Image: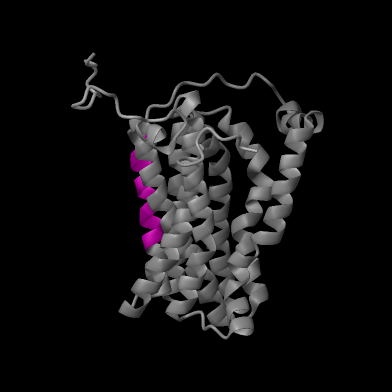
């Protein structure tokens, strides 16, 4: 019996697309558009994450100053994550996300301009703090966007692709730095490139129609403490949050300290191509793992 579906092949059989797979998630146009734009923007972010510590370390020779700049980027997440989540529940998320992309774009342009003239470190710190604040205010709304772009049964594939996107950009970003640095690209060029990549997400969001979400009826202080109550009442959530916090505390400092570690422990100069390729390999395994979750491991127990 021949299937009359437009998706049928010449043999009359439908192509096998397993629900929950990465391929199934990519079949949804809105998710595919956001995925591609986000991948490009994340590549720009990781280019900046590679170049900024090198730039600061070469200017100051102090890993402590580099760590301070990384704190300016990551610190706002600690302070603003919960308020940003409250905001994400109360506003039009698409417009809010577009506004935060423009905030990060603006401060990245400022950072590029400051780096071009070797401005004082405190000025660069403030520009990076602006990028960090924009990222912190953006994250909860962005996390809430993903489930609205695919059906529930394709959410595992979308999540695996999101993980692959983040870690894949950690591979591609350093490789691009390694390829472009010998051609004369300077730090401010990379920062300016990162600024432009935010426009990809602004464009993708302008073409995306997200379902309307009902505003959170919870008022006042209860809105801020709701997440803590959930963690207190659900041991599984509490364990996951503690595990993630410990992992971040131990693993994330390498982003800023890697130039000093590479030079002092391995004798690898941070301006060399070897340094950038070494940086890229850190994320390769994670990228492959995320891709496997949405392909060969589909249907397996996620535990």
Tell me where residue 140 appears, x and y as whole percent: 58, 38
In this view, 268 is above or below 174: below
Q: Quadrant location of residue 171?
A: bottom left
Q: Is residue 201 magenta?
A: yes
Q: Quadrant location of residue 25?
A: top left
- Is residue 224 shown left or right of residue 72? right
What is the residue that sits farthest to the bottom in this orientation?
267
Tell which of 175 and 257 is nearer to you. Answer: 175
Q: Which residue sits at x=18%, y=27%?
A: 10
- Is residue 194 shown left or right of residue 223? left
Q: Which residue sits at x=38%, y=67%?
A: 176
Tell me where residue 112 appears, x and y as whole percent: 42, 66
Residue 212 showing in the rendered view: yes
In this view, 240 is above or below 19: below
Classify the position of the C terminus by image quarter.
top right
In this view, 278 is above or below 93: below
Residue 110 showing in the rendered view: no
Q: Is residue 237 magenta?
A: no
Tell which of 29 and 106 is nearer to you. Answer: 29
In this view, 197 is above or below 202: below
Tell me where residue 298 appears, x and y as whole percent: 50, 36
Q: Quadrant location of residue 233?
A: top right
Classify the position of the N terminus by image quarter.
top left
Q: Which residues are magenta?
A: 193-205
What is the residue that sits farthest to the front in this orientation?
1
Tell me where residue 287 appears, x and y as whole percent: 49, 53
Q: Which residue sits at x=45%, y=49%?
A: 165
Tell which of 23 and 210 is nearer to you. Answer: 23
């Amino acid at each position: 019996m021949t299937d009359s579906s437009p998706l049928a092949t010449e043999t009359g059989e439908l192509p096998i697309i397993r629900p929950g797979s990465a391929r199934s998630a990519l079949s949804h146009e809105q998710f595919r558009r956001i995925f591609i734009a986000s991948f490009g923007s994340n590549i720009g972010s990781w280019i900046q994450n590679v170049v900024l510590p090198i730039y600061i370390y070469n200017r100051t020779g102090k890993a402590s100053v580099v760590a301070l700049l990384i704190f300016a980027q990551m610190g706002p997440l600690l302070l603003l994550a919960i308020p940003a989540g409250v905001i994400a529940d109360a506003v039009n998320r698409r417009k809010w996300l577009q506004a935060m992309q423009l905030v990060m774009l603006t401060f990245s342009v400022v950072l590029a301009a400051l780096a071009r003239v070797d401005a004082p470190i405190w000025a660069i710190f403030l520009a990076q703090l602006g990028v960090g604040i924009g990222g912190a205010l953006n994250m909860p709304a962005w996390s809430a966007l993903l489930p609205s772009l695919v059906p529930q049964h394709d959410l595992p594939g979308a999540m695996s692709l999101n993980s692959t996107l983040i870690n894949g950009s950690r591979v591609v970003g350093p490789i691009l730095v390694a390829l472009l640095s010998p051609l004369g690209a300077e730090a401010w060029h990379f920062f300016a490139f990162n600024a432009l990549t935010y426009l990809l997400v602004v464009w993708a969001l302008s073409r995306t129609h997200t379902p309307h979400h009902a505003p959170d009826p919870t008022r006042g202080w209860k809105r801020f403490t709701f997440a803590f109550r959930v963690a207190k009442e659900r041991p599984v959530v509490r364990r996951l949050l503690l595990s993630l916090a410990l992992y971040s505390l131990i693993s994330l400092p390498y982003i800023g300290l890697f130039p000093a570690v590479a030079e002092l422990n391995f004798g690898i100069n941070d301006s060399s191509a070897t340094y950038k390729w070494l940086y890229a390999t850190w994320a390769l395994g994670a990228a492959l793992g995320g891709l496997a979750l949405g392909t060969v491991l589909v249907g397996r127990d996620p535990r």
